[in-house]
Image (cartoon, rainbow, N blue to C red):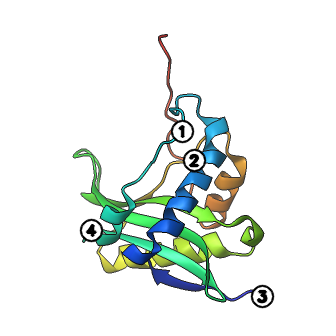
């Protein structure tokens, strides 16, 4: 079994992280016709790395960064039974490492981080037609909860 090290990202990792972000956008583009034309960016990665209410984690194999994910603590809607939750995002695994447990290791580390912050609810979003991602999240215990619907008026 392949060994992976999970560590916190630093500002020195930004180039790799921005490359990962573009790979995520490329993979998600077929699922979302509303994405603007390139170049686009989903995240302020530097802000997430430096934030007190977030962590950006990386998976490394033999010194190479092969996966990423972040957790950010957000305020919950006032009608929910929890006040805060962790939102997971930026989940990426390099193609050669997919299916080897990288995503699970990152998610497990983000869940552990959330627990240290007193968080009892974790959420993420995934495109409804992105079956490989849905299966990966279901493997680590996530369940489908809501479906966001849209209607373009153009």
* Residue 25: numbered disc: 2
Mark 4 vs mark 1, foreground winner is 1
Front position in the image: 78 or 34 = 34
Dot 4 falls on a residue whose secondary structure is loop
Q: CA distance from mark 2 to mark 3?
A: 30 Å
Q: CA distance from mark 2 to mark 1?
A: 9 Å
Give the mark nearest the N terminus, 4 or 3: 3
Question: Which residue was labeled with disc 3?
Answer: 1
Q: Residues within 10 Å of mark 3 (few under 14, many from 20)?
A: few
* Residue 152: numbered disc: none
Q: Residue furthest top?
A: 154
Label 2 close to label 1 by CB (< 8 Å) = yes
Mark 4 vs mark 3, foreground winner is 4
What residue is shown at x 53% (from left), y 56% (from top)?
21
Q: CA distance from mark 4 to mark 2?
A: 23 Å
* Residue 51: numbered disc: 4
Q: Residues within 10 Å of mark 2 (few under 14, many from 20)?
A: some
Percent coordinates x, y for residue 104 in the rendering: 61, 72
């Amino acid at each position: 079994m392949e060994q992976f090290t999970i560590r916190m990202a630093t500002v020195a990792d930004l180039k790799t992280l921005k490359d990962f972000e573009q790979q995520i956008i490329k993979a998600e583009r077929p699922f979302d016709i509303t994405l603007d034309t390139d170049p686009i960016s989903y995240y302020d990665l530097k802000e997430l790395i430096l934030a007190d209410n977030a962590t950006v984690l990386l998976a490394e194999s033999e010194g190479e960064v092969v996966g990423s994910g972040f957790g950010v603590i957000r305020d919950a809607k006032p009608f929910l039974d929890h006040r805060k939750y962790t939102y997971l995002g930026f989940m990426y695994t390099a193609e050669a490492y997919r299916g080897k447990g990288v995503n699970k290791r990152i998610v497990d580390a983000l869940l552990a981080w959330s627990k240290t912050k007193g968080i009892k609810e974790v959420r993420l979003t995934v495109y409804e037609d992105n079956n490989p991602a849905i299966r990966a999240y279901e493997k680590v215990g996530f369940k489908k909860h809501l479906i966001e619907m849209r209607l373009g008026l153009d």
